Amino acid sequence: MRKYFITGLLVLVPLAITLWVLNLVIGTMDQSLLLLPEQWRPKALLGHDIPGLGTILTLLVIFLTGLATRNFIGRQIVSVWEGVLTRIPVVSSIYSSVKQVSDTLFSSSGNAFRKALLVQYPREGSWTIAFLTGVPGGDVKNHLSGDYVSVYVPTTPNPTSGFFLMLPRADTIELDMSVDEALKYIVSMGVVAPEQQSGRKLVIDSPPGSN
């Protein structure tokens, strides 16, 4: 009976967690329907809500926004809108910070979160997985002697929290695994191990002006 119970858990727990996450994501994205006038909402038109309709609406808005900003007129509208936001106290600092982070993370030309690394943390001889986020900038690099990289060390099993570190480039090892594989390894607390491949010292070109 114990074996059957454990087998049932192995089948149902991943399924239950997957459905819970999907329900959370879809439920959050469905909140976009609240932006519509009340008479346009499914409950007013059909008499009941339609789960997932808000998710489709959210994805459609994101797609159309990206499509519109790809042309000249769209870029001008975004430029004017950003100019207005940067003139509003408090809002300007929040918006600028969030925009810089999102541009770094989602830029196709950047290296942020596109490389999994092996670093010694929290002490020498203890190793963990980290993600490359770039190189130190601003006045920080003036106080660091040598070649450094910026890394994010996620916590287990919740990788959305973690620590930001600046380490010598020579002390990091680039792993031959994708970011998705590394995240699975972290979330599973080392249970779901990726296929073994050869590691190599991290070698990335510094962006212009970083020296």
Image (spheres, rainbow, N blue to C red):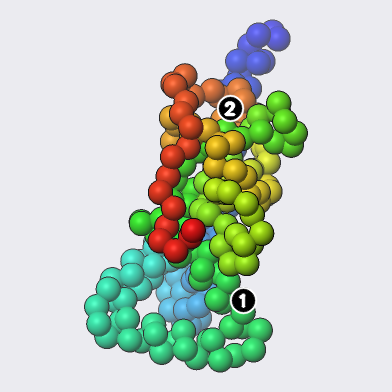
- The mark lying in front, picked from 1 and 2, is 1
Query: Is 161 rendered above or below residue 43?
Result: above
Most extreme residue toward the left is 71
Would you say the residues marked 1 and 2 are in contact, meaning their CB atoms lie under 8 Å apart? no
Query: Is 168 rendered above or below residue 57?
Result: above
Residue for point 40% across, 61% down: 208
Residue that numbered label 1 is attached to: 94
Kindly indicate the quadrant of the structure image that contains residue 63. Answer: bottom left
Query: Is 79 rendered above or below residue 61?
Result: below
Secondary structure, mark 2, is helix
The percent coordinates of residue 203 (x first, y second) are 44, 40
Secondary structure, mark 1, is helix
The numbered mark, 1 or 2, whose residue comes first in the sequence reads: 2
Residue 26 located left or right of residue 73 = right
- Could you tell me if residue 23 is visible in this image? no
Q: Residues within 10 Å of mark 2 (few under 14, many from 20)?
A: few
Most extreme residue toward the right is 123
Please state which amino acid type lies under the numbered disc 2.
Leu
Please state which amino acid type lies under the numbered disc 1.
Ile
The percent coordinates of residue 66 (x first, y second) are 33, 70
The percent coordinates of residue 27 (x first, y second) are 55, 58
Residue that numbered label 2 is attached to: 12
- Could you tell me if residue 59 is visible in this image? yes
